[in-house]
Amino acid sequence: MLGLPLRALLSILACVALALPNLAQEPGFAGAAQELRQAEKWGELAELVSPHAEEAAAAEGRPLALAFLSVARAGSKDFDGASAALLALREAGQDPAAALPGFGVPAEATLNGIWAHCWSNFGAEANRGFWQAYFDVLEATPYARVPASRLLMAALKLEDAEATAKLEAWWDARVDAYRTQGGPLGLWVGAYGKAYVLAGVGGPRVMELCNESFALQWEAAIKEHDFDPTAEALDLAKQEACDLDCDDAYNNLAHASVLSGAYTPETSALAAREAEPGARFAAVTEELGLAGVRNSRIAVGDYDADGWPDLCFQGRLFRNERGERFVEVTQELGIAPGGNAALFLDFDADGKLDILIARSPHPRLFRNLGKREDFRFVEVTEEAGLSGLSFPAGPEGVAVYDCDGDLWPDLYFAIYEQPMATGHPDVLMRNTGKGGFENWSETSGVAAASGYCGRGVTACDYDLDGDQDLYVSNYRLQRNLLFELDEDGSLVDRAEALQLHGVRQPADGQYYGHTIGSCWGDIDNDGDFDLFAANLAHPRFVRQGFSNLSMLYINQGEAGGWAFSEERQARGIRFQETHSDPAFADYDNDGDLDLSITNIYEGVPSALFQNDGQGSFAPVSFRARAVAFNGWGQAWLDYDQDGDLDLLIASGSGCELFRNEGNEHHWLRIALEGKKPNRTALGARVRVTTIDAEVERSWVRELRAGRGTSSQDEPVLHFGLGDWDGRVSIEVWWPGESRPQKRNARVDRVVEIAQR
């Protein structure tokens, strides 16, 4: 995740260190050792410093050599050896927790070396191996906090009562000492609580620890940044700085809240910060047959045309049994799963949904044989001209859209990295209209304009000119792209002209953001489409000034030249480190689009923000009871056909399905059927308007296939209508047609509209 900027940072630190007095000269090995440390050549570093670390070495050189040796062994995953070097350092008269001239703090450097290998490893036995010896050496120092937390987690997971009791007593003593004598109480209480949540343990005691930690961290942050959270006009920059400082405590409390079932303002400080939700959710993963599904991306489509949306997890196909259960039918229907993502599409315009699986070295395409063949699938990858592709890296973002205006569905693949931070040109496959595709990457200009670490693709006619534009999200602090169809038939990147490429950091630098997924939607009901770009942003990089945070781009419309203004923070979207896949959806049927964001990494919660009707947002995740952890893809669908949107979050830790429990608001769902070749009506735009209302209201949606980081929502346009129970007018702008098709309808129903 860290990429090249970290190496650049280490180079700077190395130069600073080499400039310190006596480092390169006394003792003589230090300059070479520092260079090897910066280059992460751990074996060579250990070989260089080992002779100087022996007991017979000169006294002035041995402590420095032992410090380098501890880092070298940590870097090469010899954790016992690293702790032994620290122990020898202490026995040589140097406190490992104190700064050593020319090196820094050995305990801190070694901890960081171990952490780099195991920060995301929560295995019980593995963590005992990582941390026990380190804890034994540094038990009395401030650097014992991390290993002690992980060791308690391991003891809890292993149900080791003796070790648990011993560690809890140690923690209680340390925390009590900080309470009475002063010190970093918030950090220690937080690490204590984190041990329980990482072990999957909740309860009143855990909530007490995590609530206290969050309160202490927040109090320290507002003092540090001189932020007044009670001011009528909040200082948004200071508020964000506080959120950055408290993100880990936020995550721990979120995890504790879910484990403990603490969703009310009285039980969780996070729920206390939230607005009253317009609807609530119930977790139904297990009862709907999806327990144990551990896939990171999800697509929704009705492959058997029975009116009930089915699910495809990276090629694993689940049939919807009339809203009562999902049953896997992958093998019996002839699909071979296993890829980065999968999408439903009708590539041959026969009216049946086929399945595209994005994978390396080339995608696989499965054609739906229809009702007469019991909706079995047959692979047509070679016949469709896709087997000859050879992706240089995994395709992370995939979209099905009409790139050239001929109404046939084309395929765009955003190619990720290989090796790390090395991007490759994206691939655009144009539908020939004859059952296959041709490589249009060079001809269209995509190959020349891309070449970044592609992560997500989302189509939208943002300027309402009748053709589909394509936003490409790129990772590794790289700029994003917006492709438009030019008059000569080529695709031109207009992201920079419209201020959608990200923010260059520093102003004369080369860094942008780690963008993962993005989504389009009319959040302010002004008739045009706005854009949310989700950036994974490590706080340490943000503070150093070279990592974009997530961005909410507000479309200024035709009068504003279709330019965009970035307003995420002003509109209430809180920072989280690992924003991943966003989606707009009217979950409470009140007539405005809300925002859902997944967050990758174990222990990091998803976020649900409720629109206030004016395009600003308030958090409702916990009070709405729609929180999942380590989420990647997501999809909104009405799986039980009751008129409200349910939420499915895909995760390598296990997917989560949340049933919307609804409210009294009214709704309308529109299922479109286009003419051949665009049978699925990709790119169709629909406006619904109240008839004879005292104050007219209007809503706009657009039908797409592929959003964010290869997610796909149910291909039925959903309109919440709030308290409006009268008639509405419907206007459909079909791709390729300049005038809308019109009809009227009553509310609270699914309206099927076929293109005339």
Image (cartoon, grey):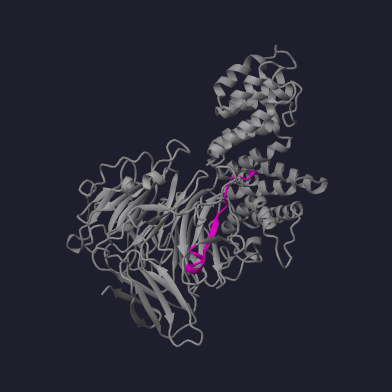
| Residue 631 in sight here | yes
Please provide percent x and percent y for residue 678.
27, 64
Please provide percent x and percent y for residue 194.
62, 48
| Residue 655 in sight here | no
Q: Quadrant of the C terminus?
A: bottom left
> Within the image, what quadrant is residue 151 found in?
top right
Q: Is residue 322 above or below residue 240?
A: below
User: In the shown orientation, is residue 378 left or right of residue 188?
Assistant: left
Q: Is residue 595 above or below residue 81?
A: below
User: In the shown orientation, is residue 167 left or right of residue 536?
Assistant: right
Please provide percent x and percent y for residue 262.
60, 62
Can residue 548 be found in the magenta stretch? yes
Query: As drawn, which residue projects farthest toward the front?
Result: 488
Q: Nearer the viewer, residue 490 or 97?
A: 490
Residue in the picture at 68% in, 31% down: 107
Which residue range is magenta in the image? 544-562
User: In the shown orientation, is residue 466 left or right of residue 187?
Assistant: left
Query: As drawn, which residue projects farthest toward the left?
Result: 372
Q: Nearer the viewer, residue 407 or 205?
A: 407
> Within the image, what quadrant is residue 116 found in?
top right
Residue in the picture at 71% in, 31% down: 105
User: In the shown orientation, is residue 55 left or right of residue 553?
Assistant: right
Please provide percent x and percent y for residue 196.
61, 49
Q: Nearer the viewer, residue 259 or 565?
A: 565
Can residue 676 be found in the magenta stretch? no
Q: How many marks?
A: 0
Query: As drawn, which residue projects farthest toward the right?
Result: 181
